Each structure stands twice: as C-alpha cells, then as structure tokens.
C-alpha cells in the first residue's frame, strides 16, 4: 500500500490496510520485535526512568529559551565556517536547498534518512530541478524504488516483507535474488556505493544540534550518514528548530535513551558529529556546510496546545505500541508523520482540519505516553484536538450534535437517570447476549466495527441505594 489518497476517507484507507495480508504480517513481526527489544533495553538500564524525566526537563527548559539557543547555535556554526539558513515554510526550505544545489552545479544528491526532508517533499522538488535524489538508507532506498513514502519514523519500509523486497529488486534492478536480508543488503550496498562517489550534494537531517559548540549530530545504524556528510562537495543538513540542545552534557542524556526507545540498542552503531566544512589539512569532509533551520509551524506551537509535541525525538516507540498503528500501518494516516505522535505533528504543520478524522484514530489507551522516552502526554493532546475539531465546527454536524447532547446529558443527573431508563427500553430490539452489535441510521457508524455493551438493568446509583439500606446503622 503506497501513500494514501487523502480524497479517500480514513475509515476506507484503514479498512484496506487491515485486509492487506502482507502488511499485517510485516507489521506484526516488526512492531512485536521492537516492543520486546525496548523492554529488554530499559529492563537492563535502571537509570532509564530517571533519565526520561531529565530529558523531558531539558526539552522544556530549551523551549522556554529557544530563541537564545538558536542564536547561539547559528553563531557557532558560522564561526566554524558553516552557513545557516532559516526557513519559515516548507516552500522556503525547498527554495534554499535548490539554490544551494544550483550554485554547486549538482546533478545528483545522495540523502541520508531524514523525516524533515520528507516533511518538505524535497525529493519531488529536486527531480523537477534536474537533480536526481538517491536515498542511501536501506529502508528509504527500498521505498524510493517502490515509489512510496515512509510508513514508520525509523523503519521506512516496515510495511514490506523480505519477499516483497526481493520481488521489488528483481523488477527495478533486474536482478533475481533470494528473499534473504543479507543478500538484499549486499546488493543495495553495491548499487549505492557508486552514487556516493558521483554525487555533488549530500543531504541529511539532524537528530540534534548542540548550541554551545555548533555541532550537528546524526544518529544512524548503517554508516550512510557518514558517507553523505564526507564524500560530496556540499553538505546540507535540514533540521526542525526544536532539535537544538544546549550542551554536550544534555546530548548525552538523549543518546542514552534514544536508541533504547527506537530499536532496543544500548547505542546506535554510528553517532556522527559534524563541525563545519573541511578545514585545511583534513582529508575528508565537504567544502561547504549548510544548516537549514525549519520552522514550518513549530514556533507557533511554543504557546499553543501542541507544545509538548515539540519534545519528540522521532524514535517511533509510540507507533510500535499503538494498537491502531499496529493494525493499519503508516500509509493509512495519509501524511508524512504516522502514528499517534504523527497526528499531533500533522495538526501542528497543517492545522486541525487536516486531522479531523485522524484525531479519533486512537484508543486513548495511554501506551504511547508510557513508551515515549520524554513522556509526551499524547492522549491528552489528542483529546484537546478532538475538542478543537468540535468547537471550530470542523467535525461533521451530526457528530457535533450527538456529542453536544451527550455532554449536556452527563452534566444533568436527573436527565441522565431518565435517559438510562429510556435507553433500556429502546435498546431491546438490538441487544444480543448482553451486547449491541448494530444500530440504525448514523448510529450505525459506532457499531460497524465494534460491539457496544448493553445498558445495565440497574445503574450503579440505583444499586447503591439498595446497598445503603442493607448497611448496619
């Protein structure tokens, strides 16, 4: 299943995903593995829970003085010979990068994995400008060959089985290979090595940037990030403004919990520190380093209801434990960022109207908040989003009317008790074995994919009165 068509209702997209046997198999294997690895990683790391609290405190303290830390970062990057560009929108960011590529005479750009470049739809812009983008992360390379977009924050091709990847390589690379991960990886490595040597432009994201040293930090497992930052003549790093951290000491806290939350590793295989372009006497590194600081709606949320979403480390832990994501995968969400945190990020970038359906794509079970390495209260913000969708009249009229009536009912005890009696009568034709499995009219939306418990013969309030009479004086 490729990137979803947003003209198709979310429920239909989700239904199609749940009928995809290959997707269900891939999601079950991958997310179950990630959950187990994360549990083991934190089980062997008693300091982890305390560090999660510390990381959250660092994030909040940084956001409170974000302007100061960004200014410090800019000063230090430029002191080291780099150039910093601020982009208010995705279009501005694309324009900056295309201009850098034009001046460099670039015809090919190798890219390390970056959700920020996915967010601004950079690949399409590069192609239109005559610059061929080549994804060098294995997962990103796979989905680029498939003409798809990432379905997971850290595992872009999580929705594909090894058999599907083998078929894809046979079709696109014209090489028949076994469905063996090692063989497939070796083939991809051979295809990509030549691209690193040909490219004039290297494009990466940035997991962090250290304000007091001007250091850009990349956290990867494949080493492609180092190739992208060292071989091409020009390196462009695209980073959301919220990724800045004050110091190296603060960075160590995040590195201690990021890999454990994302992949269950003690530490990622490669943690790359980039400080400016190549200097005299150095054998490798780019001639130019450009850092693009991306706003794209983030700064507005510093005083907004989605502020906590700016804490996100993009580890993907909340996706792995989400019962909705584990059933429908990432493409059904229809936007760059999937899963529970993706709903919040999409609302931040594109406004509440963009998630009028997605705001309800959560059971509010709290598993995402429990898994988050910085304890983002995702369920609370989803509830706030639902409230905003209702108050701004983005939700359908019937839905707003039902919830408004229900809200009034819950705040009026007399009406609530009367409604309980009426509901007992009205439900009789629909109750089977203690559950309501179908309802007429628009109420049928509630029972199309779930059963509702029948209204109890006696409410708790009615039972309590009887218990009070039986109690001793």
Image (tube, grey):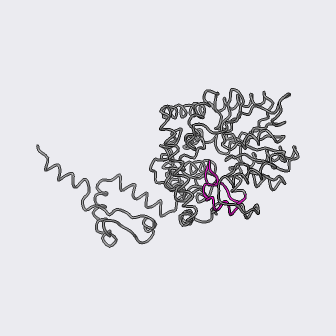
For the point 47% across and 61% down, which residue is it?
Answer: 399
Q: Is residue 118 left or right of residue 314?
A: right
In terms of image quadrants, where is residue 87? Answer: top right
Residue 250 versus residue 141: which sits nearer the camera?
141
Question: Which residues are the magenta region?
Answer: 145-168
Q: Which is the main secondary structure of the residues drawn in magenta? A: loop
Quadrant including the C terminus: top left
- Residue 37: % across, % down: 52, 44
In terms of image quadrants, where is residue 285? Answer: top right
- Residue 334: % across, % down: 61, 58
Residue 117 versus residue 161: which sits nearer the camera?
161
Specify whether residue 303 is in view.
no
- Residue 402: % across, % down: 43, 61
- Residue 26: % across, % down: 57, 58
Q: Is residue 402 left or right of residue 240?
A: left
Q: Is residue 315 above or below residue 251?
A: below
Residue 19 versus residue 356: which sits nearer the camera?
19
In terms of image quadrants, where is residue 62? Answer: top right
Q: Is residue 264 left or right of residue 470?
A: right
Q: Residue furthest left?
A: 473
Q: Is residue 139 above or below residue 8?
A: above
Specify whether residue 231 is in view.
yes
> Is residue 175 in the magenta section?
no
Q: Is residue 21 above or below residue 362?
A: below
Residue 114 versus residue 377: which sits nearer the camera?
114
> Is residue 167 in the magenta section?
yes
Quadrant including the N terminus: bottom right
**In this figure, what is the number of numbered marks?**
0
């Amino acid at each position: 299943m490729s990137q979803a068509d947003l003209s198709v209702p979310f429920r239909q997209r989700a239904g199609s995903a749940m009928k995809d046997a290959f997707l269900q198999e891939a999601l079950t294997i991958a997310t179950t593995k990630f959950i187990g690895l994360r549990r083991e990683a934190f089980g062997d790391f008693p300091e982890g829970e305390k560090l999660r609290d510390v990381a959250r405190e660092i994030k909040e303290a940084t956001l409170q003085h974000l302007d100061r830390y960004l200014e410090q970062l800019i000063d230090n990057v430029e002191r080291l010979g780099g150039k910093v560009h601020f982009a208010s929108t995705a279009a501005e960011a694309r324009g900056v990068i295309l201009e850098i590529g034009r001046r460099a005479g670039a015809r090919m750009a190798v890219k390390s994995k970056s959700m920020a470049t996915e967010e601004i739809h950079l690949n399409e812009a590069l192609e239109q400008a005559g610059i061929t983008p080549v994804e060098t992360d294995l997962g990103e390379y796979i989905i680029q060959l498939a003409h798809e977009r990432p379905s997971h924050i850290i595992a872009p091709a999580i929705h594909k089985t090894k058999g599907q990847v083998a078929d894809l390589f046979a079709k696109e690379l014209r090489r028949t290979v076994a469905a063996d991960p090692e063989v497939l990886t070796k083939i991809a490595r051979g295809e990509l090595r030549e691209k690193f040597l040909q490219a004039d432009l290297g494009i990466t994201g940035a997991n962090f940037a250290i304000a007091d040293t001007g250091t850009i930090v990349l956290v990867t497992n494949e080493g492609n990030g180092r190739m992208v930052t060292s071989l091409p003549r020009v390196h462009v790093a695209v980073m959301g403004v919220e990724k800045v951290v004050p110091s190296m000491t603060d960075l160590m806290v995040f590195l201690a919990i990021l890999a454990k939350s994302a992949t269950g590793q003690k530490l990622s295989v490669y943690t790359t520190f980039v400080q400016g372009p190549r200097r005299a006497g150095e054998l490798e590194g780019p001639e130019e380093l450009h850092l693009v600081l991306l706003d794209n709606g983030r700064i507005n949320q510093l005083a907004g209801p989605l502020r906590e979403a700016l804490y996100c480390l993009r580890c993907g832990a909340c996706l792995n434990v989400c019962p909705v994501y584990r059933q429908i995968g990432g493409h059904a969400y229809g936007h760059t960022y999937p899963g529970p945190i993706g709903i919040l990020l999409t609302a931040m970038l594109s406004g509440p109207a963009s998630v009028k359906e997605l705001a309800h794509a959560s059971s509010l079970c709290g598993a995402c908040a429990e898994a988050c390495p910085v304890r983002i209260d995702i369920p609370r913000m989803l509830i706030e989003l639902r409230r905003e969708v209702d108050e701004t009249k983005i939700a359908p009229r019937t839905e707003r009317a039902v919830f408004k009536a229900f809200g009034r009912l819950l705040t009026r005890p007399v009406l609530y008790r009367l409604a309980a009696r009426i509901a007992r009568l009205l439900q009789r034709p629909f109750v089977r074995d203690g559950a309501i499995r179908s309802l007429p009219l628009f109420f049928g939306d509630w029972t199309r994919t779930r059963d509702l418990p029948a209204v109890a013969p006696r409410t708790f309030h009615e039972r309590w009165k009887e218990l009070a009479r039986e109690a001793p004086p």
